[in-house]
Amino acid sequence: MSDQSDNAVSLEQAVIDLSLAIGQLRRRLRAEAETSELNISQMAALVRLHHHGSMTTADLARAESMKPQSMGTILASLEVEGLVSRERDPTDGRQVQFRLTQKGSAVRRADKLARRDWLLSAMKKLAPDEQGRLISAIALIKRLGDS
């Protein structure tokens, strides 16, 4: 019975350690790859529009788990910067859809490339066996994310 208890405790500690490590990596990626003055919520809206195409304020808010008023503020700031534009919904003229502009796509792409370049550089500093272990862990981390 002690082995099961020890396993549960070590699994709980692993969960804590993994959560902390993922959070630290995300913060480091953001800090090292800052290519614009956009905050996390603004960048998330650009990424979502890139992946899903035009969306309404309400749809974006729902997708990002925030209030429509908060998303409206984010979109307004992005529109002022020329990163998104608004257009009438083709099926319901009362609705407004937001889409990425060319400038918005360029900002999102630059941010993505900066993060990728930093991570590549950091991984190259690992020993070859560490690189292999990290690469092997990717599939497991993906499975956790999909579960």
Image (tube, rainbow, N blue to C red):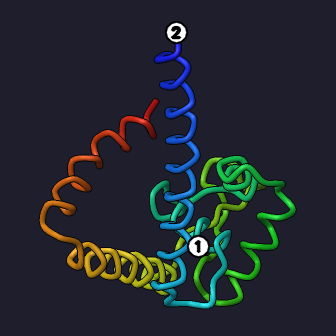
The location of residue 145, given as percent across then percent down, is 45, 40
Secondary structure found at label 2? loop
Q: Amino acid at mark 2?
A: Met
Task: Kindly identify the residue that appears in the image at 26 percent across and 76 percent down.
Answer: 120
Q: Is residue 24 above or below residue 103?
A: above
- Whether residues under marks 2 and 1 lie with C-beta atoms below 8 angstroms apart, the answer is no
Measured along the vertical axis of the image, is residue 82 above or below residue 109? below
User: Which one is nearer the viewer's eye here, 95 or 145?
Assistant: 145
- The residue under label 1 is which amino acid type? Met
Sooner in the amino-acid sequence: mark 2 or mark 1? 2
Nearest the eye: 129 or 39: 129
Rendered residue at 29%/49% (across/down): 138
Residue hosting label 2: 1
Report how many numbered discs are placed on residues in the image.
2
Q: Is residue 71 left or right of residue 105?
A: right
Q: Position of residue 36 (x, y in %)?
A: 55, 90
Left or right side of 53 for 79: right
19 or 7, which is in the foreground?
A: 7
Image depth: mark 2 or mark 1 in front: 2
Residue 85 lies, with reference to residue 55, above or below; the image says below
10 Å crowding of disc 1: few (<14), some (14-19), many (20+):
some
- Which dot marks residue 43? 1
Q: What's the residue at 50%, 57% (across, down)?
A: 22
**Res. 135 mark:** none
Q: Residue furthest right?
A: 69
